[in-house]
Amino acid sequence: MVLKTFGWSFAITVLGLAVAVIYGGWQAFGIVAILSVLEISLSFDNAVVNAGVLKKMNAFWQKIFLTVGVLIAVFGMRLIFPVVIVAITAKLSPIDAVNLALTDKDRYQHLVTDAHPAIAAFGGMFLLMIFLDFIFEDRDIQWLRWIERPLAKLGKVDMLAVCISLVVLLIASMTVAAHAHQHGGMHADKGQTVLISGVAGLITYMIVGGLSGFFEDRLEEEEEREAEAEEKAKRTGTKVDAVKLAGKAAFFMFLYLEVLDASFSFDGVIGAFAITNDIVLMALGLGIGALYVRSLTVFLVRQGTLDDYVYLEHGAHYAIGALAVLLLVTIQYQINEVITGLVGVILIAWSFWSSVRRNRALAAAEGKDATSDDAAEVSSGV
């Protein structure tokens, strides 16, 4: 099971590290290895959240997620995205931006640093909306009940998550964005940039999330109709066509996953510049890490881990909320990537341990019930 799920990840790791040695020697090998670990540690919560969405998709779309999705993640977000950001902010053509990334790495790093406020605002708002929509939903299973119960009641207010996100964005544009960190330790007023980018992130979430939710609901309705039609077909001997809407629903959920991955990858891409400004090594290291995150996502789905450890999804969403806040804070202040990664790891580890304790308590309760039933049978002479 492990080899089947992680086989490609292991193979690409060997290939990527070999390319690194050929490209830049053993020093490049070490940099790529560090970047891979960095990406995995920063994106573990991404894998948990992805698994919650991916388990609703069939085997075909899970394969698409591991093939086409990986190409988008590696080449799109880890290679092309930093170049596009530089091209837009520096008003360069894509070719000039690529040439700059390969020939003048220091200048390239400076331009990416200057573009960070826009990146952080977009990703921060997208992730914040994911967290708020989760925390405001009334759920049968609650982890931190003292927080989740009152927030679930507040969630009945229409558009509350959007209102809170806009308030947070407005505060960020007037505070941290007013002294946004730039290269060389300088600061600049990026209030307008942060405001526009944050609104763009919010709109992106509402469009992609709304479409995926809409088609998912339609899919569930069609599946119910299909089940009824199949029952009728058995009685009448007629043939029923398969549900055709599944493709649309799966496509928009796939699109949602890709945008989600893009938002998660912002801190990894920016953090990578603290280790290297070589775009080739960055793409290799982050790409290997991204592949492991995707394999881990599929592993969680196939093992049913989210069903067995019910608080994992909660912990991942709390990590998302923390990452959203940290992204906005990094507009002005530099935060070590170790701290960013540890926040997510601690929250997920805490939720995992809470799930283990819950499972033990349920097992103990079932054992007591079984013992009580046996005692009752003996006393009654059965």
Image: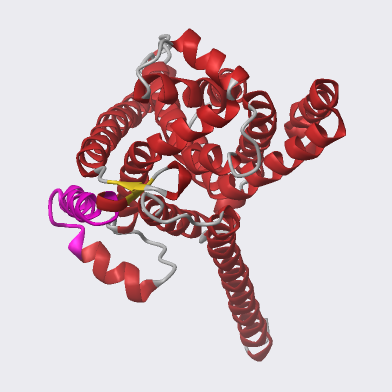
Residue 219 appears in view? yes
Q: Along the horizontal axis of the image, is 17 left or right of 105? A: right
Q: Tell me how the rendering is colored.
A: secondary structure
Determine the image quadrant of residue 204.
top left
Residue 155 coordinates in the image, percent (x, y): 21, 58
Q: Along the horizontal axis of the image, is 173 left or right of 308? A: left
Residue 338 coordinates in the image, percent (x, y): 60, 57
Residue at image position (41%, 71%) is 144
In the rendered image, the quadrant that contains the N terminus is top right
Q: Nearer the viewer, residue 48 or 284?
A: 284
* The magenta segment: 154-177
Residue 56 appears in view? no
Residue at image position (78%, 32%) is 28
SS assignment for the magenta stretch, majority: helix
Asked if residue 157 is among those painted magenta in the image, a careful observer would answer yes
Residue 381 coordinates in the image, percent (x, y): 67, 86
Q: Nearer the viewer, residue 174 or 96?
A: 96
Q: Nearer the viewer, residue 13 or 178?
A: 178
Relative to 175, residue 219 above or below: above
In the rendered image, the quadrant that contains the C terminus is bottom right
Residue at image position (65%, 37%) is 276
Asked if residue 13 is among those painted magenta in the image, a careful observer would answer no
Residue 224 coordinates in the image, percent (x, y): 34, 30
